[in-house]
Amino acid sequence: MSLKKQAAGGVRWTSVSAMYSAIIQIIQVSVLARFLDKKDFGLMAIALFVIGITQIFIDMGISNSIIHKQKVNKFQLSTLYWLNIFIGFTLFILVFLISPLIAKFYNVGELTNVIRTIATVFLISPWGQQFESLLMKDLNFKSIAIRDISGRSVGLIVAVLLAILNFGVYSLVYANISASFISACLLIIFGLKDHRPGFVFSYRSIRGKGFFSFGMFQMGEKLLNYFNSQFDTLIIGRLLGMEALGIYNIAKTLTLKPYQIINPIVTKIAFPVLSRIQNEIEKLKNAYLKIIGTLSSINAIIYGLMILLAKPLILIVFGQEWLVAVPYLQILSISAFCSSIGNPMGALQLARGRADWGFYWNLAKILIMPLALYLGSFYGLKGVSWALAIMKITLLFPTWYFFIRPLCNAKFREYFSCTLSPPLIAVLSGAITCLLFFISNLVFLSIAMLILFSTVYLTLTYFLNRSLLVNVGEFIPERLKTIFKF
């Protein structure tokens, strides 16, 4: 099977997984929002913040080095596998010990047990982590999709049942653990078909082979990027309280959901695919611009609709009591769209073996992002939201100049025509759609805005950005093209 067909197959399977996961997650949050307090969502946000930081250290960035390197022998894989297990156990002990200090920092005693309980994922996820990397390297996204769907389904069932039984924040905690357990088990089952880790540990086999140098920069980049993306959580939880964090986190979760669903559909496949053509610069540039243009076009219509339909969206998903989150949803939609544009750069950097560039970029951002968010916090949740949006917009040009341009020779016009024309089309579509505000009924208004915005956006895209339709068409199965005569 050609690389293009493998990539298209990977996109289809990842799309199925992403759409199913999106529906499951929306149902889960929608149900739990009616059973849990705003404070519970704030507690979970802090717990996941802590776990997210420490999870970065589980494999020390080595999983991506396995994908980047085209040849890795069995001794090296076995050694790296058991190293992951050992690191996971060590992180569990570390988080268990420091959890009281974190709870004291936020002046919330119950955080200790919440963090300690959810930290058990460190004893579970490392067992399947390497198998996931190998499946991705082989572009076997069908197995990964089955894993994702199964894990999410079990997590939903556990979360809803425990919420009904009044477990409070622990319904979220145990749902997370259950999903991790199912995911690890399925990865082991799928992965053992092609690779069985031996009971050997040979440091000599991985020393000086580039695993740690690549992995250290990758780990450092992930850690800094995580702090940059979660510093708003840290600031709000500390300065504005758990209830304010719960409101903000609901809006942030909803705005990040499209980007977290849509982008991985492409970027998960992009990394191994771009790695195979890493030395063919012209082909690499064309592939990357196609990726960034497609993601920008799809995310622009979604976030345009989220801004227009923020109120009915909050009402449907979370209920009347969460309407206070509407303005934050609208502002954070701008930030999330900018993130969706910048996100694929990581796959390009890793494909070219420049994990160090990602590290230095996030090191630079961490010097300015926290300060901007801290200053924004003086103006409450809106201040933090706008500070984040402004920073994301400001960083678009440096991203191209310092990284995209030297990595694949993409010219200014080539890059920004791909990334900026879709949001401009979305703004124009939104302006036309706002003419419908004379409709007083919220249901009719929402339906009319959805139809008009989508129609105008797709029409303008057809005339002004037709390459998007060509790119999307490449991933449609041949049998469907025949049926619908594409």
Image (tube, rainbow, N blue to C red):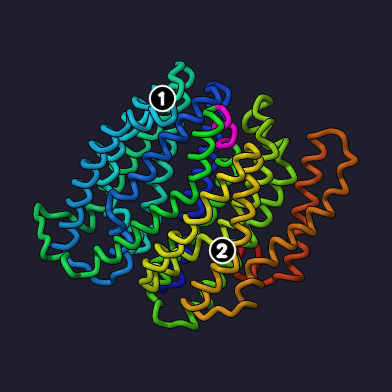
Outermost residue on the right side: it is: 438
Residue at 43% over, 43% down: 149
Q: Can you give x and y, in whole percent of width and height, for residue 376 in the image?
A: 61, 44
Residue at 53% over, 43% down: 232
Please state the extent of the stretch shown in magenta in the rendering: 243-250
Distance from disc 2 to disc 1, alpha carbons, whole Å, reads: 42 Å
Q: Quadrant of residue 257?
A: top right
Q: Is residue 435 left or right of residue 7?
A: right
Residue at 32% over, 31% down: 99
Q: Is residue 232 left or right of residue 178?
A: right
SS at mark 2? loop
Under mark 2, the amino acid is: Ile
Tell which circle, 2 or 1, labels the residue nearer the N-terminal end. 1
Q: Can you give x and y, in whole percent of width and height, for residue 331 in the image?
A: 67, 46
Position of residue 293 relative to residue 164, above or below, is: below
Around disc 1, counting alpha carbons within 10 Å, would you say few (fewer than 14), some (14 to 19), or many (20 or more)?
some
SS at mark 1? helix
Front label number (2 vs 1): 1
Q: Can you give x and y, in whole percent of width and height, for residue 52 in the image?
A: 39, 43
Checking the image for residue 170, the label placed there is 1
Q: Is residue 340 left or right of residue 87?
A: right
Quarter of the figure that contains the C terminus: bottom right
Q: Which residue is mark 2?
A: 476
Residue at 43% over, 21% down: 162
Dominant SS in magenta? helix
Under mark 1, the amino acid is: Tyr
